[in-house]
Image: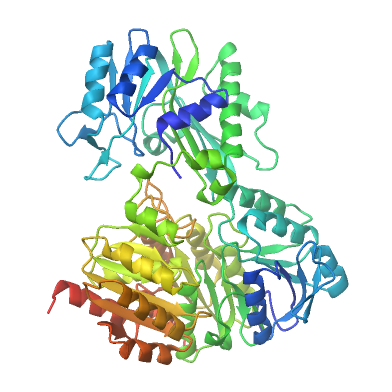
Amino acid sequence: MNIHEYQAKHLLHEYGVPVPRGYAATNSHEVETALSHLDGDMIVVKAQIHAGGRGKGTFTDGYKGGVKVVKTPEAAREAANHMLDNTLVTAQTGPEGRKVQTLYLTEGCDIEHEYYLAIVLDRETAQSVIIASTEGGMDIEEVADKTPEKLIRVPVCPTMGLRNHQCRQVAFALGFKADQVKQFAGILSGVYKMFWEKNAMLVEINPLVTDKNGNLSALDAKVSFDGNAIFQHPDIEKLRDLNEEDPKEIEASKHDLAYIALDGDIACMVNGAGLAMATMDIIQSFGGSPANFLDVGGGANEEQVTAAFKIILSDPNVKGILVNIFGGIMKCDVIANGIVAAAKNVDMTVPLVVRLEGTNVEAGKKILRESGVALTPADSLAQAAEIIVEQVQSPS
Amino acid sequence: MSILVNKDTRLVVQGITGKTGTFHTQQCIEYGTKVVAGVTPGKGGQMWEDKVPVCNTVAEAVKEHGANASVIYVPPAFAADSILEAIEAEIPLVICITEGVPVRDMAEVRRRLEFNDTKTRLIGPNCPGIITPGECKIGIMPGYIHKPGRVGVISRSGTLTYEAVWQLTQSGHGQSTCIGIGGDPINGTSQLDAIRMLNDDPDTDAIIMIGEIGGSAEEEACAYIKENVKKPVAGFIAGASAPKGRTMGHAGAIVSASGAGTAEAKFAAMGEAGVSIARNPSEIADALLRIYKG
């Protein structure tokens, strides 16, 4: 689960990491309140969306930049007016962009140098790793690619936790001296504590900056959490912004369905994540384009299958549906009854191909054939994919 | 014969009195698995379904009932603790079926598994389990699709494994042992570990490896196959059509925003290692039978 920059910075601040003073605003009234709290001769207006590359992004009306550094409250107001409720397209949003519904207005910072600091949970070594670099403010993958020697990596044992000497090690490697070593060690231990306590998968501060007085602060932050652990953190769950999610995915999660919207036109409904991916793959290999990933789980019942059909059909791009179920312990005849009942419950407007395999498959196919529901039963996965691609691409 | 489990395996079920535990324990007993005990803290001394004694601790199940393998069906919040309890009780094989275990918990478990005094191999979490057809089924896979034989199967997925096993069985080829290693980013047994075991097993003649996008487990396994495995190996990777940066159902199935962990890279590693590639999930058994006559 991802959160916004302003939420990440509030959390970091709670863990003792210095961040520039700032206020979130969702309308012009809140923009005024924020501006009344900010003084100094530099104000930064930042669009809050769950995607990077905001500074270099362009709004769909041509307005350039989702991050503006301005000198006066008037200029900040003008930037805020342009951004709020406007749609920002960045390298990470895809061409459709994201609607900006929240802004973050912060005080400016006289930057001396930009650093990079992150902690990630590394799956290969099963431990967290601190990644730091003197080359902050740019894409870290580019740094890793072009100047790997500038990347500092320090693994942290999950049972020992982060130790002071490791904080110092990173501080010295970044070239900090005297008081800054202590400042940095405090920041790193705060970041690690937050990372560990809140079950984060990634905390990234880019850039971490020093100002003209030598003080460090986090200028931008990105945090994502382990979805499996959210139940342990109601405070984090509250930070979820449904505006950033596809409404179909939100609806699916209410029915315990794993659904991901894609941009193709052949929907699929499958039991099991691996088989669901493989079903998308086979649609693609027959020249079709999958409209979604959908795993109805091992024990999918009629209610879930009905909900799944409704979600699939709410996508206007969908021109056909492929249901692929391997009936194991859940028998094919039971599943067939569920599919038939669900199909009768919804207004099926597109071709439906059903492939069942496994326990009681013949009984299942018989139920499908005799159901009176307009569907094509298929004998194999390859045949099912071939039929649905054919039906969608050359409708009779 | 087989690896890890056989007719002599004595199973303890952690979470036996729960709904999932009860259902799948019945299925496993019907298949012929020897379930010697269950564990549900606080229900020690009871009998589950009049058949299996329930213990308060795993240590008790080992001491009193000679359990030498454990399967875990407890909810995600308690799964890591259950694994650690089984490790402390020195159970040689632990299979965690539970889906949704926090990754941080698994990082801690994995460190415990690396201790020198650890006697346990963990399979999973978020996996269908392990089966040696005709002898022992531990987990949630449908038993009847399997058939005793000489092909080993390893997979990160549940139903996709059933698909491959069914293809094998229908073409007349049985399986030595099928291991579901699970779909999570941090697990107990990797593709590489499983390949090694099947390669060393005299009763396995050929291997099917089913992978998914995300991580580098398949690449590591392929590097080993290239150098060490003479047995015929066929493979498939799910997720070639998945978009970057999205978790595809399994927590571990994600191509990172920077493009690491793609199906393309994994297929390439398979090609490099001489693995017979199924480009299509309905041809997994066929890919093996191109290079293995059985």
Q: Nearer the viewer, residue B153 or A69?
A: A69
Tag count? 0
Q: Is A326 in front, or is A365?
A: A365
A86 with respect to A168 (left or right): left
Residue A19 located left or right of residue A279: right
Pick the residue in front: A106 or B186: A106
Q: Residue at x 46, y 32 (%)?
A: A8
Compared across the picture, whether B273 is left or right of A339 comes to right
Q: Is residue B282 visible?
A: yes
Q: Residue at x 44, y 17 (%)?
A: A21
Percent x, y for residue B48? 76, 76
Residue projecting furthest to the right: B64
Residue B76 locus on image (x, y percent): 61, 57
Indicate the quadrant where residue A265 lies.
Answer: bottom left
| Above or below, comparing residue A192 to residue A109 in the picture | below
- Residue B216 at what x, y percent from top left? 48, 56
Q: Is residue A389 above or below residue A371?
A: above
Residue A45: give x, y in percent of width and height.
31, 22
User: Which residue is at 78% across, 81% downward?
Assistant: B50
Residue drawn at point x = 36 percent, y = 60 percent: B264
Which picture quadrant has residue A140? top left
Q: Quadrant of the C terminus of chain A?
A: bottom left
